Amino acid sequence: MHNWALLLRVMLRRDRVSLPVWILSVAAFCVVFVPALPQVAGTPDEVAVLAAMMDSPAMVAMCGMLYGDAHTLGIMYTQLMIVWSALLVAVMNILIVVRHTRGDEDEGRLEVVRALPTGAAAHLGAVTVLMVGVDAVLTVLMGVAMPSFGVDSIDWAGSWVYAAALGICGLFFGAVTLVIVQLVHSARGAIGAGLVVLGGLYVLRAYGDVSSETAAWISPLGLIQRTFPFYADRWWPLGILALVCVILIVAAFVLNSMRDMGQGLVPRLGGLRAHAGRTLYGEWGLSWRLVRGTVVAWGVAVFLLSAGYGSVMGEMEGFVQSSPIYQAMMGVGADTVDVVGPVVSMLLLMMAILGAVPVLTTAYKIRAEEGRGRMEGVLAAPVSRVRLYGGYAGLIVLIAVAMQVLAAAGFWMVASAVMTDPVPVRVVVIVAFNFGAAVLFFGGLGLFLTGCAPRLTLVGWAYLIISFLIVYMGGLLDLPRWVARLTPFGLVQRWPSEPFSWWPWIGLVAGGVVLAVVGALGWRRRDVI
Amino acid sequence: MTDSTISLTGIVKNFGRVRALDGVDLQVGPGQIYGLIGPNGAGKSTMIRILLAILRSDAGHATIFGQDVWKQAVDIHRRVSYVPGEVNLWPNLTGGEVIDLFVRLKKSGDSRYREELVSRFDFDPTKKCGTYSKGNRQKVALIAAFSTDADVYILDEPTSGLDPLMEMVFRECVREVAAQGKTVLLSSHILSEVEHLCDRVSIIRQGRIVDSGTLAEMRHLTRNQVLVEATGALDGLAGLDGVHDLALVPGGAEFHLDNDHTASVMAYLAQAGATRLVSTPPTLEELFMSHYQG
C-alpha cells in the first residue's frame, strides 16, 4: 500500500472536473423531486389516487414497493425514487471504478505507476478509498439536502437512512466492479459485466417486490428499500450490505495479488483464429463486428427485462379489478385496452428509452474508433467516408427496429400467458412502433453529433437522460404536457391514452433523417480526430 | 508537376492556433524511394495524414497519381498501402483477422504472399491484438501493407518497435517493391534506415521542408570532415577560407572543410608536406544536425 495517498491525489487531480459533476448531478437527481411532491400530493384525495396508482404491480415492478401504514410523502418518494436513484449511483460507481482500474491498465498508465516506488496494492487501495470517499460525499450531500426542503414527513432521521442506503448501495456496486476488473480482460468488458450484474439485480428486485420477499432481500436494490426510510428507519439492513462490501473489497485485493497486470483471471476466450471469417468483410462487416457484442447483449437485456415487465400484467389485471380508485382513474367499466393500455405504454416507453442506448453507442462508434486511433488505418484503405457512415446509419435503423421488436415480443409473450384477458398483440405492436420514432430520432441525433460536433457527444447522452427524467417523473408530477413534448419520447402521442397521430411520428423520423444527412456532410468534410 | 507520383504544393495545416505545416512543397517521382526525415513534432505525420485524406489541408494542393488526395481519396487508396507509426488495433480481433480485413478492404491481395510475409516476419497471427506488443502490432500493419498490391507505399516511421532482425526483413520488403518500380515515401527519424534505403531525402523542420535532394546533392552543399598528417607545420590552416573547427594535433590536424574551398586548401596541404589524408562525407545524421543546430 506504499504511496497510495499520492496515487489518490493524482486520481483526484485527474478527475477534478468529472467527479464534482458526477456527484452533484447524481445528488441532484436523487433529491430534486422532493420539493415537487407536495404539489401533486397535497390533499388526502390526491395522496389516495397517487398511492393507488403506485401500488399497482406494474409500478411496484418498475420502481419498488409501497410500505408503511399511511401513505406519507416520504414513503411515496422512497418508492418512486430510491431504486432508480440507486441505479444511477451504481452506474456512477461502476464507471469510476473501471476508469481508474482496468481503464488505466488498458491504456498502459498503470504500468508506469507500478514502475515507480508504489506498493503492489497501492493503486487498488487508492481506488477503494476514492470510491468510498465519493459515496460518502454523496451520502452527506443527500442527507443534508433532502430534509432542508422542509417537506412534511421527510425528516432528518429518515433522510439519513435514505441517503446512506443509496451511498452503501453504490459502494456495493463499486466493490462488485473491483472484483470484476480482476476477472475480465478489458475496461469495456468490465463495464459490460458490471451493468449485467446491475440489470440482473434490478430484475431480481422487480420479481421480488411483486412476488417473493426472499428474492427482494437478495438484491441490494430490494434490500435498501427494506430500511423503510421515513417509516421504521431501520439501519441494520445497511449493516448487512456494508459487510458484503467489505468482503467483496477483500476479495478484490486477494484476486488482484493473484494476477498479472493487463490480464484477467478468467481465461480469455477466442483467439486462435489465423484468418478472418466470412462476415468480417469490408467496412460494413467491420462495423457490425465492432458493435455486435454490445448490440446482442442489449438485445438480450431488453428482451428479458421486457418479459419481466410483461410478467406483472397478470397481477395488474387482478389489481385493477380490486381497486376502485384505479378503476375510477382509468374510466369505469372500460375494456382491457383502456385499462391496461396505459400501463403497456408506460412499460414499453421505459424499454424504448433503454433501446435508444445501443442506438446512440452505434451512432458514436465512428467517434469512438477515432479516439482510439483506429479510424486512420481504415480510412487509409479504399473506404469511402460516406459509405462507412451510411453503413452505421443502416445499422442504427436495424438496431432500433430490433430493440423495439424484442421489447414488444418479450413483453407480449409473457403478458399474454399470464393474463386471463390478454392484451391484444396489436396494442403492443402499435405502442412499440409509436416509440420507435423517438429511438430512430436519437440515432439521427447521434450521427449528427458524430459528424458535426464530435466533441459534444455527451449532449446526446444528456438529452436521453433528461428525456427519461421528464417522461418518468412527468406523469406523476403532473408536469404540463408541453414539457414532455420537448423530448422525443414525449413528442409522440401517448397512445392509447391519447389518440394516435402520425404527425409527431413522421416529424421525428424526418428530423432524424435530416440530422443524419447534415452529420454526413460534416463527417465528409472534417479531420479525423 | 503532373509527372510526380506524389505532389504537395504550398500545403498549410493549422490545429487551432498552432501551425503544423507552413507551406510544404514536395515532389516524389515515380519509382523513387523518398525519405522524409525530421524530429518528432516536425509535421511528418500531419503531412502523411493529409496525403491520405485523414486530415484536410487548410491551403495548398496535394495529389497522388495526379488526383486530388481529398476528392479522389477512394480511387487513390486502391493503389496506396499505408503503415502508420502508431498502430492501433481492435483488441478483440486476432492479428490474422486484422490482416485479412485490411487486405479485403483493399480488394487486392495475394494470400500466398501473405503467408510468406507472416513467416518472414516471424509473426503469430492467432493471438488477439490486445495481447500484442508494439512491435507485433507494427508487424500486422507491415504484413497487411506489403501483401496488398499497391503502386505507392506510404510508411510513417514503420519500424518503431521492431527488433533489428525484423528491421532487416522490412528493408528487404522495401527493396523488393522498389525493384518492381513502386514508389515509396518513408518517414523516419532513424537516419541510418533512410540512408540505406532512400534515393532522395527531404528534411522537415517546424512544418517546412528545409532541404531536399539526393544524398549526394545534399552532401555537396556541406562540409567534409578532413583528417591530415603532414611533415611540415599546419598552423596556416587557421587563416584559410573554408576551414572550420580546426584542431591541431602533433604531426597533423582535423578540421571541417567547405566543399567549394577544397582546391585552395589542398594546395596548402601539398605545400605543407601532407603524408596522409582522410576525407569523410557527412553522414545523414550530421546533415540533419546541421539543419537543426546550424
Image (cartoon, coloured by chain):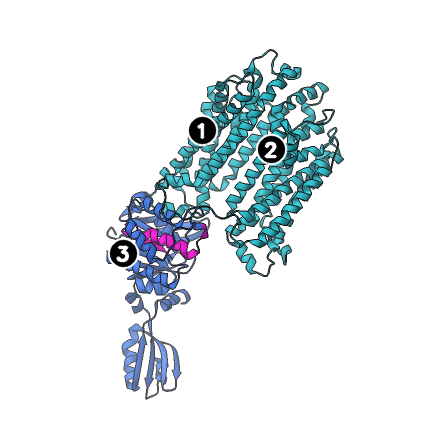
Chain colours: A cyan, B blue
Q: Quadrant of the N terminus of chain A?
A: bottom right
User: What amino acid does circle 2 point to?
Assistant: Leu
Left or right, A34 with reference to B69? right
Left or right, A438 with reference to B118? right
Residue in front for this viewpoint, A22 or A297: A297
**Residue sitting at 63 percent across and 19 percent down?**
A319
Left or right, B149 with reference to B158? left
Residue A473 image position (x, y, % from top left): 61, 27
Question: Distance from label 2 to label 1 (Cα)?
Answer: 27 Å
Residue where numbered disc 2 is placed: A204
Residue in front for this viewpoint, A373 or B293: A373
Find numbered disc 2 in the image and state the secondary structure of the residue it sits on: helix
**Residue sitting at 66 percent across and 30 percent down?**
A213
Please say whether residue A131 is visible from this viewpoint.
Answer: no
Instruction: Tell me the tag on residue A401.
Output: 1
Instruction: Tell me the tag on residue B158.
Output: none
Q: Residues within 10 Å of mark 3 (few under 14, many from 20)?
A: many
For the magenta stretch, what is the residue range?
B130-156
Residue where numbered disc 3 is placed: B177
Please say whether residue A390 is visible from this viewpoint.
Answer: yes
Q: Residues within 10 Å of mark 2 (few under 14, many from 20)?
A: many
Residue A80 image position (x, y, % from top left): 65, 29
User: What amino acid does circle 3 point to?
Assistant: Val
Question: Distance from label 3 to label 2 (Cα)?
Answer: 63 Å
**Residue sitting at 41 percent across and 36 percent down?**
A392
Above or below B285: residue A38: above
Q: Which residue is outermost to the bottom?
A: B231
Find numbered disc 3 in the image and state the secondary structure of the residue it sits on: helix
